[in-house]
Image (spheres, rainbow, N blue to C red):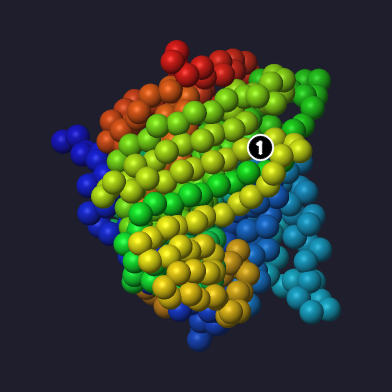
Amino acid sequence: MKKDWTRREFLKAGSVAVAGALAGVPGRVLADEDGRPIRIGLVGCGSRGTGAVEDALAADPNVHVVALADLFVDRARSCLRYLRTLRLGRELHPGVRVHEDRCFVGFEAYRRLLDVPLDVVLLATPPGFRPIHFEAAVAAEKHVFIEKPVAVDPAGVRRVYLAGEKARERGLSVVAGTQRRHHSGYLETVRRIREGAIGRILGARCFWNQGGLWHRKREAGWSDMEWQVRNWLYFDWLSGDHIVEQHVHNLDVVNWVLGSVPLRAVGSGGREVRTDPVFGNIYDHFAVDFEYPGGIHVLSMCRQMEGTDGAVGELVTGTEGRADPGGWIDGARPWRFEGEVPNPYVAEHAALLASIRRGEPANEARQVAEATMTAILGRHAAYTGEVVEWDALLASDLDFSPPRYEFGDLPVRSVPIPGRS
């Protein structure tokens, strides 16, 4: 029987319930009484993956990093070199236990890593690979830290959603890299908003506007595949475009505050500054109007252009005030968050590891899949220039996957043109 891919299907299990379940998890967790370390492996040895390992080591004093996997040998080696410099006090960190024979390279490296005895897999490759790796990790019965976004197209979102259900059935923990869900200021402010601190919510704005990012010059001998993966930010099948790769954080907060996902979206966007072919086929700006249940509209903006105003955040307006979900409320009941804010990048790993030690599985797969799909909805609205319905897009056959995962020729899709795409 075909799965009913609708908003109702996404929401029926209560996507916002998990957010509060881990609110009491401290910034660090205690080791098992028997002293058994939690063994972790990393898939994706770039800066985010390397940082995720460092955060996990900071979150729990009894974690061992035992295996690394990456498409490229230079990335795996640089990650290992860095990890071997980490210190705990005056000594080299005892949690770094990776031997060279457990550094795996290539398109199948993740499978070889999953054959290693370990408990947790950190998934931090470019997002286009995420659904494949998540499915494999769950099938191997590993707990998972899954970086955002978790897919780049509806086909990938569906795969993550189903794998997340399997993880739940098997008692596996899944925690996502949407760190605002583990930020004490956000946790308390969102709780107050949802309890009526600004009255009935009328609408919201969210934005991630900044300058440009890095790119790597193509080297002699690089195939199309290697060039694109090493410059993954700029190709739709790898990053999903920056509205998906980056702005997903803000859209996740909006979904969290509203307790829902959007019904539909209409938007615009384009490629005004980053027009050189080195920047692949993505846009450099988006503006999207998301419509949520109850007639609530959310204005979303994101931009990556040098020399422009930078702003990152969310604002929610209600009948009795307005709020920044990150820490303040103005209006009938003004309030400011003044508590401590443990590093949320560490706190998300503390939540994952604590859930494993307590035998109380956490599962954030659904909520991060919703956030990813929300961003994909906005992107598709801008790419096409049409009003795009959530249900129709989620059920569609839109799939950015390359025909083969191998080094070689890989033509770049044309930059989308609204009205023609």
- Say whether residue 336 is left or right of residue 333: right
Which residue occupies the extreme bottom position in the image? 33
Q: Name the residue located 25 percent from the left edge and 57 percent from the top edge.
A: 13
Q: Is residue 342 left or right of residue 294?
A: right
Q: Quadrant of the N terminus?
A: top left
**Image quadrant of residue 96?**
bottom right
Relative height, residue 135 to residue 231 (above, below) = below
- Residue 340 visible in the picture: yes
Q: Residue furthest top?
A: 420
Badge 1 marks a residue whose secondary structure is strand
Q: Is residue 74 left or right of residue 150?
A: right
Q: Nearer the viewer, residue 39 or 56?
A: 56
Residue at left 49%, top 28%? 268
Residue located beneath label 1 in the image: 304
Front residue of 264 and 31: 264
Residue 373's x, y, as percent? 40, 41
Q: Residue furthest right?
A: 90
- The quadrant in which the C terminus is found is top left
Residue 322 in the figure: left or right of residue 389: right
Q: Is residue 201 above or below residue 237?
A: below
What amino acid type is highlighted by mark number 1? Answer: Gln
- Expressed as whole percent of the image width and height from the top left, the position of residue 337 reads 55, 76
Farthest-out residue, left: 1
Q: Nearer the viewer, residue 131 or 153?
A: 153
Kindly tell me whether residue 103 is visible in this rendering: no
Residue at coordinates 63% horizontally, 35% vertically from top-left? Answer: 233
Where residue 342 appears, as percent x and y from the top left, is 61, 74
Q: Position of residue 88 (x, y in %)?
A: 76, 76
